[in-house]
Amino acid sequence: MHLTNPKSVLAWIALVTLGLGPEASWQRLAAILGGCAVLSVTIFCGYALVFSTAPMVGLYRRARRWIESLLAVFFGVAGLRLLLSRA
């Protein structure tokens, strides 16, 4: 999912270059890339497991209207601020 978003790819590249530095070895690069891969798989598989359980599906169904309303207000205010900004 993140690979199709150029902003996240560029952010990860920036973070990796900060972690490596100019004198980094290939072992260090492999460790950082491997760590990022393990973290990504762990986090997204965790999300899939947690949010596919019956209690979480039920909770989301009950809270869906509130969640979507809150997000609509948030993005509406953010959009208005962008429209009214003078930058």
Image: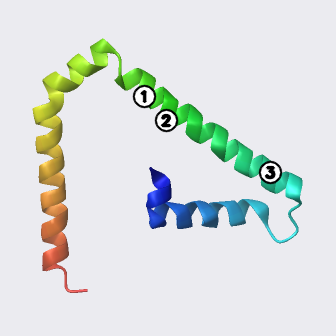
Q: Quadrant of residue 14?
A: bottom right
Q: Give how far apart the Cα atoms at labels 3 and 2 are.
A: 21 Å
Disc 1, SS: helix
Question: Residue drawn at (42%, 28%), measured in percent from left and top?
Answer: 48
The disc, 1 or 3, on the residue closer to the chain's N-terminal end is 3
Q: Is residue 61 above or below residue 41?
A: above
Q: CA distance from mark 1 to mark 2?
A: 6 Å
- The spot of residue 56 in percent (x, y) is 30, 19
Is 7 located above or below residue 35 in the figure?
below
Q: On the image, numbered disc 1 is attached to which residue?
A: 48
Residue 11 placement: quadrant: bottom right
Task: Report if the CB atoms under discs 1 and 2 are less than 8 Å apart.
Answer: yes
- Coordinates of residue 52 in the picture (x, y in percent): 35, 21
> Marks 3 and 2: CB-CB under 8 Å?
no
Q: As drawn, is 26 to the left or to the right of 37?
A: right
Looking at the rendered image, the quarter that the C terminus falls into is: bottom left
Along the horizontal axis of the image, is 30 left or right of 17? right
**Residue 70: percent from the left, percent from the top?**
15, 44
- For disc 2, the marked residue is 44
Q: According to the image, label 3 marks what residue? A: 30
Q: Mark 1 Cα within 10 Å, few/some/many (few <14, many 20+)?
A: few
- Which residue is depicted at the point 18% across and 57% down? 75
Tell me the SS state at disc 2. helix
Specify the label residue 39 is tagged with. Answer: none
Mark 2: which amino acid?
A: Phe
Mark positioned earlier in the residue sequence (3 or 2): 3
Kind of element beneath mark 3? helix
Q: 75 and 57: which one is in front?
A: 57
Residue type at the position of mark 3? Ala
